Each structure stands twice: as structure tokens, then as C-alpha cells.
Amino acid sequence: MLNSLKKIGSKEDFFSLFLNSNWSISKEFINNKNWIAVPVPNNLTLIESEWMSNAIHSLHVNKYLEYTFEFNGDISIKIIENNQNNIFYSDFNNSDKYVILTNDNLDFLYFKNQNNLYHLFCGEYDFIYQCLKCSHKTAENIFFYYGVNDYDENTDEYLYLKDIWEYYSKP
């Protein structure tokens, strides 16, 4: 199952494939895959983990890869059976780390930042909206109401989250 991702090489190659200089999933990676990406505030919820598991199953994927790492740290890789509980705990049990969930063919990507300020669904339109179960406008309202606006204006967190939404909303 790790065939194509073994070719990535070093951790620096891994980071440069997926991440931008702000340690978020790079738009170049997303655009090269012809994907969209939608950020969601805070940590993955139980219902989101169920929706994501179902979305992954719709791609005929029964196992996913869990990559966890800290800033410039070593990368831990696990192959995990796709189900709601495992997806939830991939996020929950790694609250102190960055998390990337995907499969060997990179048919989808889930990302959580190390500070637990947001998580990100990346993939084709159908995959994303199986994970979100709402419109892009509603996702934006949720992101601002439950994420950005949880912080005082002009704080680092407020500005960071506002920039995250803008970054992924632009083509």
C-alpha cells in the first residue's frame, strides 16, 4: 500500500510535496490534483469522521495512511482500517501533531494543523461535499462563526484563520 508514497524520499521531500511555507497544504499540490479544499474550524467531530469514512468508502478505499509529525519533525506512518472510530482517533489521538490522512493513490487528503485551529478536506468536489454535507457558503459561515470569530480581532489566531479561509477560497 505504500508504493507510490515511498517514492517521495526524505521528510523534506514529503513536506515540500504537501506543505507550503506556512505549514498548510499547498495550493500548488491542490491545483495540480485539480482538487478543491475546504477548511473547517477546530478538530474533527464524530459526525464528520463518519461522513469522511463514508466518502472514503465511496472511493472503494478500505484502508488509509495516517501521517503524523511535528514542525520539521520525523514522520510517523500507519496503515489504518477505514471506519468512523479510526478516523476520529487518528485526529483525536494526535492533537499535538500535524495529521495527514490519505491513501496510496492520493485520491483524497485530510489535514489537521498542529494547533488544532482547523482541519481541511481536500479532494474532488463530490468527495468534499460527502465530508461536509453543506454548501460552500454554509461552510464559510461555520468557519467564521465557530473559528475565526472565537478570537478577538487582530489576534494572531483571528488573522491566521482568516488568512486560511482566504487562501483556500481563491482559485
Image (spheres, rainbow, N blue to C red):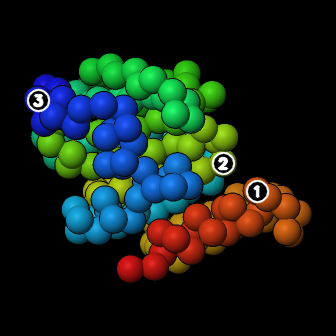
Q: Nearer the viewer, residue 9 or 132?
A: 9
Tell me if 59 is positioned left or right of 151 in this view. Answer: left
Image quarter in which the C terminus is found: bottom left
Amino acid carrying label 3: it is: Asn
Q: Where does label 3 land, which residue?
A: 3
State yes or no: discs 2 and 3 in contact (Cβ < 8 Å). Answer: no
Q: Where does label 2 land, which residue?
A: 117
Q: Where does label 1 land, which residue?
A: 157
Task: State the count of labels.
Answer: 3
Residue at image location 39% in from the left, 42% down from the top? 15
Residue 39, horizontal then vertical, whole percent: 52, 59
Residue 61, horizontal then vertical, whole percent: 17, 36
Amino acid carrying label 2: it is: Leu
Tell me if 21 is positioned left or right of 15 in this view. Answer: right
- How far apart marks 2 and 3 lie (CA) works out to 32 Å
- How far apart marks 1 and 3 lie (CA) works out to 38 Å
Residue 82, horizontal then vertical, whole percent: 29, 28
Image quarter in which the N terminus is found: top left
- How far apart marks 2 and 1 lie (CA) works out to 8 Å
